[in-house]
Amino acid sequence: MRLLTIHANSIRYKVKRKTPIAEEITKKEDEMRDCLVVFSCVEKLDEKNTGKVVAGAKKEIIDITRQLKTKSVMLFPFAHLTQTLSTPAVALQVLIGLEKELKKEGLNVKRAPFGWYKEFEIKDKGHPLSELSRTICPYDSTDCDFVCPHCSNPIKIKDAEKHEKER
């Protein structure tokens, strides 16, 4: 899962057009102030362990909200963070699960609709931690069989760490 977070003074969106994978909605626009906007994208690899992905994303988002001293989160589906998207059903399941888990932690959470083209405005706070990115992996580094989507080569985490130490 890929996350791009922005500490925002405000975000506002309005749905414009439905895609074939759009969830049914009743609310066509919303906004939030003084919040962490989490642009999120569920990847094909995440389908192997959605529970771990939700838990990892929850941990990262909670850590960031604590650092920023904010209790409000806008989850914003954003497919443009990867070239290897999960199925729409899995992506929506993960985002709904993440929304529920963050609410259990006492955060004020809103989720922008999945599968809709949206017009949005965001006003970034512009401090050193106001833009961050995170990658959530569904594997432990000991059992990773990830294949790079760009070159089809396996990424061997332990080999990379060993090579880095030798440098």
Image: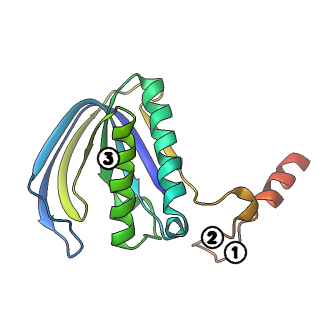
- Taking the image as drawn, is residue 123 in sight? yes
- Taking the image as drawn, is residue 167 in sight? no
Residue 91: x and y, percent?
37, 64
- Mark 3 or mark 2: whose residue is earlier in sequence: 3
- Mark 1 or mark 3: whose residue is earlier in sequence: 3
- The residue that appears at 19% across and 47% down in the rendered structure is 120
Q: Which mark is residue 153?
A: 1
Q: Please say if the residues under marks 1 and 2 sit with CB atoms less than 8 Å apart.
A: yes
* Quarter residue 49 falls in: bottom right
Q: Which mark is residue 75?
A: 3
Asked whether 73 or 78 is in front, the reply is 73
Q: Which mark is residue 148?
A: 2
The residues tagged by marks 1 and 2 sit, at their Cα atoms, a distance apart of 5 Å
- The residue that appears at 11% across and 60% down in the rendered structure is 16
Task: Establish if 5 lies above or below 161.
Answer: above
Camera-side mark, 1 or 3: 3
